[in-house]
Image (cartoon, helix red, strand yellow):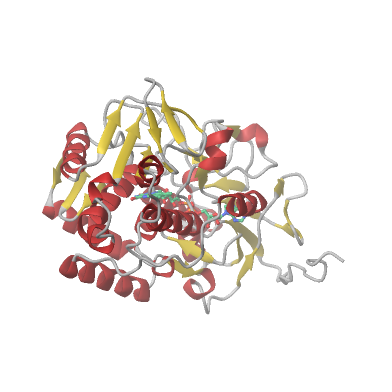
Amino acid sequence: MNRLEHLSINIPETGKKRVVIIGGGFAGIKLVEGLLDQDYQVVLLDKHNYHTFQPLLYQVATAGLEPDSIAGPLRKLLKGKKDFFFRMLRVDEINPVKQCISTPIGDIRFDYLIVASGSRTNYFGNEEIARLAFPLKKLTDALDLRSQFLQSMEQSVMTRDPEKRQNLLNFVIVGGGPTGVEVAGALAEARKHVLVKDYPELDIQHLQIYLIEGADRLLNGMREKSGEKALGYLKELGVNVKLGRIVKSYDGAVVHLDDGTEIESQTLVWAAGVQGNIIPGLNSSVDRSRYVVDAYNRIQGYENIFAIGDVAAMKSKQWPLGHPMLAPIAMQQAENLGKNFRRKENGKSLLPFKFVDKGTMATVGRNKAVVDLPKGSFGGLFAWLVWMLVHLVSIIGFRNKLVVMSNWFWSYLTYDQGIRLIVRLFKREATFKENKKAA
Ligand SMILES: Cc1cc2nc3c(=O)[nH]c(=O)nc-3n(C[C@H](O)[C@H](O)[C@H](O)COP(=O)(O)OP(=O)(O)OC[C@H]3O[C@@H](n4cnc5c(N)ncnc54)[C@H](O)[C@@H]3O)c2cc1C
């Protein structure tokens, strides 16, 4: 018997128009909030029962924070809301003709559909790297990387072979965007303040961190000055930054770069790109793995199907390939769409989406961050404080804010990171099987 056979969607037909939202990320939950005081039945579907605050995933991966302090249960975030239904389900297909979506336990009818399924790691077709590298997109990715990182440290003190030890102690990060810069910086800080004390029998200088970036600068989405500052901070922390270099291949033991350089490493972190999380069914409206949408987030060719957030490409003169994949853009699109639902009901004209850029930022380490504002940029201690404040305000849930703040405060005072536990051993093959099943 199929173990899901006894399950059904179980959502009543109330006569109200049904809005189905796929994805409880930044865009999805913002839209739910905007719709709840309107006269719709709102159904939110997500394959997880929690929302992930992705900007802090790197701190989970580098043993700075526990996973539950950067995630929030979707039911708790939205509890007590009327005419709202959450179902923890993966959506497998969209059928625009029948106006329904398919899930492993059956179909759900919609009057309006909003795809807010975010993005996934882009390996640019390199299957070997996809199989062997560590992505950083989900909570489970961050936990795998944390285990791998700590397991490598433990194994390094148990090997007498210097070559094998170096292989364990080389950490290679690909992608010089905010994620790559943040992972490299956090590992370098851990080496300086924590690992040097934890592993006294190890010459800590052997722990080498490499950051590989294809462009000739870091933080490509930010101002050039900010990229230069970040490069300076990473060099200060002893990170080996290689600009203008492409990773050609990786066999699980050696990273091959396009200039012939080989770096022996058991750990390759892939932070080099993301692509939209497309759900089969609307294929003719997809370009470069994102749904092409108009200025009102309507997917090309459909009146009642929308895409918001990372998965939507709203092309314009300023953004010929669509907006960058960033949380504020996802939230602002959701907010605008929520307003447009109300305006439509009231017979008013729809408002086109207009992104209000309040700035971008990236942190490198203790007292080291860069902030770009619409007019000007700055770095250093003040930027780091701004970075912390903005993330504390944005993280969802009072408990999470408190836990994250106290963790940061404790680490700052003691130069310590409390969470260096290998709760579940990382086993390469097992995890790849799990990932394949979940994809
Ligand atoms: C490591 C990392 C660091 C980042 N740092 C920053 C930063 O500092 N600043 C910034 O602005 N942005 C940052 N981003 C980008 C930011 O997180 C995204 O732009 C934002 O999450 C997009 O929101 P979204 O709602 O479109 O997608 P998401 O937040 O990714 O949500 C998508 C949701 O859809 C669900 N889902 C997907 N497919 C299905 C399916 N088939 N069925 C059911 N559910 C599904 C997922 O489970 C998920 O909950 C970072 C991203 C990463 C990965």
Name the one closer to the observer, 344 or 124.
124
Left or right: where 357 falls relative to 40: left
Q: Residue at x 32, y 44 (%)?
A: 178
Left or right: where 94 falls relative to 267: right
Left or right: where 197 falls relative to 289: left
Q: Residue at x 33, y 39 (%)?
A: 177
Quadrant position of the N terminus in the picture: bottom right
Q: Residue furthest right?
A: 1
Q: Residue furthest top?
A: 259
Residue 145 vs 297, above or below: the answer is: below
Q: Position of residue 140 (x, y in %)?
A: 51, 58
Q: Is residue 133 visible?
A: yes
Q: Position of residue 135 (x, y in %)?
A: 47, 46
Q: Position of residue 296 (x, y in %)?
A: 49, 43
Q: Quadrant of residue 389?
A: bottom left
Q: Residue at x 29, y 47 (%)?
A: 207
Q: Residue at x 58, y 67 (%)?
A: 39
Q: Is residue 293 visible?
A: no
Q: Residue furthest front?
A: 160
Q: Position of residue 61 (x, y in %)?
A: 39, 56
Name the one closer to the observer, 99 or 77.
77
Left or right: where 361 falls relative to 137: left
Name the one closer to the observer, 331 or 125.
125
| Number of marks in picture | 0
